[in-house]
Image: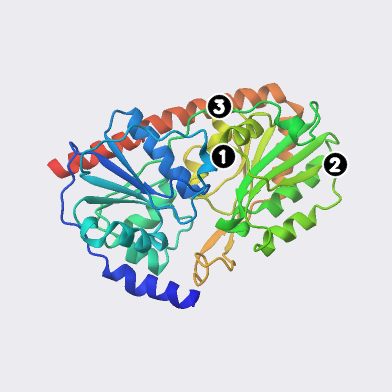
Amino acid sequence: MRKTYRFLRAHVLQRLIPRSRVAFNPRKPVEIIGYLSMPVGVGESARLCAGALSEAGRAILLSDVSTHPDEKSFAGWAPPHVSNDLPGSRIWHLNPPMLPRAIAKKGLANFTRTFNIGYFAWELEVVPAEWRNGLRYMNAVFVPSEFTRRAIAPLTAAPVIVVPHPVTEKPATEGMREKFGVEKDAFLVSFIFSAGSSINRKNPQAVIEAFRLFSAECPTAFLLMKASGDIGRDEGLRELIASVAGKARIKIVTDKLSNAEINGLIRSSDAYLSLHRSEGFGLTVAEAIMHRTPVVSTAWSGTEDFCDPENSWLVASPLIPVVDCHPEFAGLPSAVWANPSPEIAAAHLGDIFRAPERAREKATKAREFLLRYLAENSYEKALQKLAAMQAS
């Protein structure tokens, strides 16, 4: 049944959605639609967009289309002030497979009454058929990185504009080391990932291997990984946790943590290690940079927009064919992603460990670069660009 629905959604429902003929009106409010009350990446994307546009003085509306709302997870997130006027445009913070249900919930007739912008965060150079069909009915597309723009722009006549997630330095809970039994003098390496968005793509196995190699040089090293996912349903996550059983200095946490607690974990770390095979943007990498934590990152895909040899420790990565059972990545025979070297990553961790002051200076450079990059590519500037295109 699920396979049948996915096929119908990709090849029938996506083609039934009409494209709006309404022009972009910069004077009318913008409605942000997404999984606003779900602890998932696309939900955080929508929340960040709402905060950034509200702070820029743009009149906004919010529409929560969450399939599994969890309001308790966002006790610290207060929705910005919302307008009472009708929207002139909408930003859909939902990838194409999520759109038919959300558009049906809002109403097809309602969909065609505004200028529709899709915020699509794709992670490979090859774009699936369903995503190509979803591009058909969007008036414009925002993407989180130049990597994603290069993949999507050739497939649509609509404007495709890079708008990175507007990451900010948020409150961070103190005492996260104590909470998880990490000594004050331990060299703490952290990594945060969602198993639901393909555990193979996030590649925590390589993080564990890199840490194993590094810990031979640094006996005080401790690896703390925060994983989101359903252990009962996710065999890959269960296998990952089982693989570190009995290893006293590696801990995989699956507890629900608040945003402040996650920020506290990142801030209290001596290094953040992301050996992803591919990222549309790399939100947790950007968050680590914002908290001045030295970053070791794969040298490929979305993170390349703000990670370079001057501000981060990049891991050389040959490209290999994508092999994954995740429905988003299955059936893409020509797709490739990175295969980052744990040996190189371990050497970078060693460099950070041996020269902590130099590492902090480099991390400060990363933050300064990221702040400039985000300011130059904001949601407000993207909307202004659309208005200029409309006027020309």
| Comparing labels 2 and 1, the label whose residue is closer to the camera | 1
**Do residues under tags 3 and 2 come within 8 Å of each other at their CB atoms?**
no
Local SS, label 2:
loop
Disc 3 marks a residue whose amino acid type is Pro
The x, y position of residue 71, in whole percent, is 50, 44
Local SS, label 1:
helix
Identity of the residue drawn at 62% across and 59% down: 200
Q: Could you tell me if residue 62 is visible in this image? A: yes
Instruction: Tell which circle, 2 or 1, labels the residue nearer the N-terminal end.
Output: 2
Residue projecting furthest to the left: 392
Whole-number angstrom distance, CA of label 3 to CA of label 2: 34 Å
Q: Could you tell me if residue 311 is visible in this image? A: no
Classify the position of the C terminus by image quarter: top left
The x, y position of residue 353, in whole percent, is 75, 30
Whole-number angstrom distance, CA of label 3 to CA of label 1: 17 Å
The x, y position of residue 255, in whole percent, is 67, 45
Nearer-the-camera pick, 145 or 226: 226
Q: Is residue 163 left or right of residue 226?
A: left
| Comparing labels 3 and 2, the label whose residue is closer to the camera | 3
Q: What residue would you read off at disc 1?
A: 285
The x, y position of residue 384, in whole percent, is 24, 36
Whole-number angstrom distance, CA of label 2 to CA of label 1: 25 Å
Q: What residue would you read off at disc 2?
A: 216
